[in-house]
Image (cartoon, grey):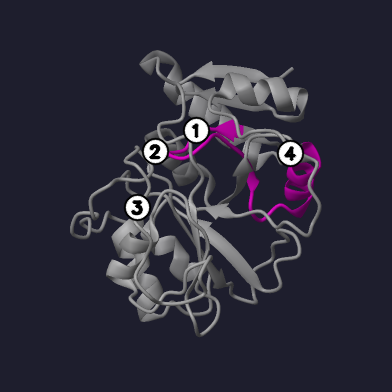
Amino acid sequence: MALFFHCGDPDVRDDAIASAAHSVASGELVVLPTDTVYGIGADAFDAVAVADLLRAKGRGRDMPVPVLVGSWSTIDGLVTSVDGRTRELVEAFWPGGLTIVVRHAPSLTWDLGDARGTVALRMPLHPVAIELLERTGPMAVSSANRSGQPPAQTAAEARAQLGEDVAVYLEDGPAAAGRASTIVDMSGEQPRVLRVGGVTEQQLREVVPDIVGPATGSTGPASPASPASPASPASAPPARRPRPSPGGRP
C-alpha cells in the first residue's frame, strides 16, 4: 500500500524523506513537490524504475524523462562538457524554473528513453525536493499525472491519478508556481527555447542574447512577459544568486 506523508509537519518530514529515499533506492516510484508542479520520480540510473515511471504515466520512450539534481556541481559529472553559456544559465536560474537540455556523458549507464544522447537537467527551488535529491542523487522526474491529464498541484491530486503505482507520496501543500519549467536546448551550436514556462524569453536573453525563441525562430526582441505570477515575474530577475555549496539546500 502506498505511503502518504504530510511534509509540512516537522515531526513527520525527516521520516517522510527517509522513506522516499529508501523507496527510490529500492527501484520504486515516489511523488515529490517541486517549485513548478508535483513530480513523479525514480532513480535516474535504474532503467527498470524509469520504465515503470513511463508506464505509470502512460507515456512511451519517445518522450524521455528529465533529470532533477540537488546541486549545481552535479551537472559537471553528467555531461561531456559545460560551455560558458550553459554555465551562465545555470548560475542565473538554478535553483528554479529552467530546464537545460545538454549532451550527457557517453559513459553514463542510464536509459531515460529515446533521448538521442541528450538529457534535460534542472535543479528545483524546493526544500523537500532538494533534501530528497541530496539523499538519492539525480532522479528521473516527470510531472505527476497520467498522460493527457493536468499536472498534479498536490500529492493528493497525484494519488488520485497514479494510485498504487507510486510507493511514497510527499505532500507539502499546493505547488507554489503551478506552471511547468522553461526548457532551453543547449545541445547544439545555437541555444534554442523549446518551451516557455517559469522563465521568460526576455529573462533568458539577459543572460544569453543570441538565444532563439520557440515561436519566431529569431533572436530579435523578446515578446512582452505574461502577467505577473509566481512562475513568471513581471520584472527582470535579480543579479545572479550566490553559488550554493555542492549538495547544499537553496
How many numbered marks appear? 4
* Residue identified by numbered label 1: 33
Q: Quadrant of the C terminus?
A: top left
The amino acid type of the residue labelled 4 equals Gly
User: Residue 132: percent from the left, percent from the top?
Assistant: 48, 38
If you read the primary sequence from the N terminus, does the residue marked by circle 3 or circle 1 appear first? 1
SS assignment at label 4? loop
If you read the primary sequence from the N terminus, does the residue marked by circle 3 or circle 2 appear first? 2
Q: Are marks 2 and 1 in contact (CB under 8 Å)?
A: yes
Relative side of 218 to 156, left or right: left
Residue 108 found in image quarter:
bottom right
Distance between the alpha carbons at the discs numbered 4 and 1: 20 Å
Relative side of 73 to 103, left or right: left
Distance between the alpha carbons at the discs numbered 4 and 3: 27 Å
Q: Is 41 included in the stretch rendered in magenta?
A: yes
Query: Relative to residue 126, is residue 181 depicted above or below?
Result: below
If you read the primary sequence from the N terminus, does the residue marked by circle 2 or circle 4 appear first? 2
Instruction: Bin the neighbour count of mark 1 within 10 Å (Cα to Cα): few under 14, some 14-19, many 20 and up.
Output: many
Q: Please state which of the two labelled residues, at mark 3 or mark 1, is closer to the viewer.
A: 3
* Residue identified by numbered label 2: 126
* Residue identified by numbered label 3: 225
SS assignment at label 2? loop
Query: Relative to residue 129, is residue 94 depicted above or below?
Result: below
Q: Are marks 4 and 1 in contact (CB under 8 Å)?
A: no
Distance between the alpha carbons at the discs numbered 2 and 4: 26 Å
Magenta-highlighted residues: 31-56
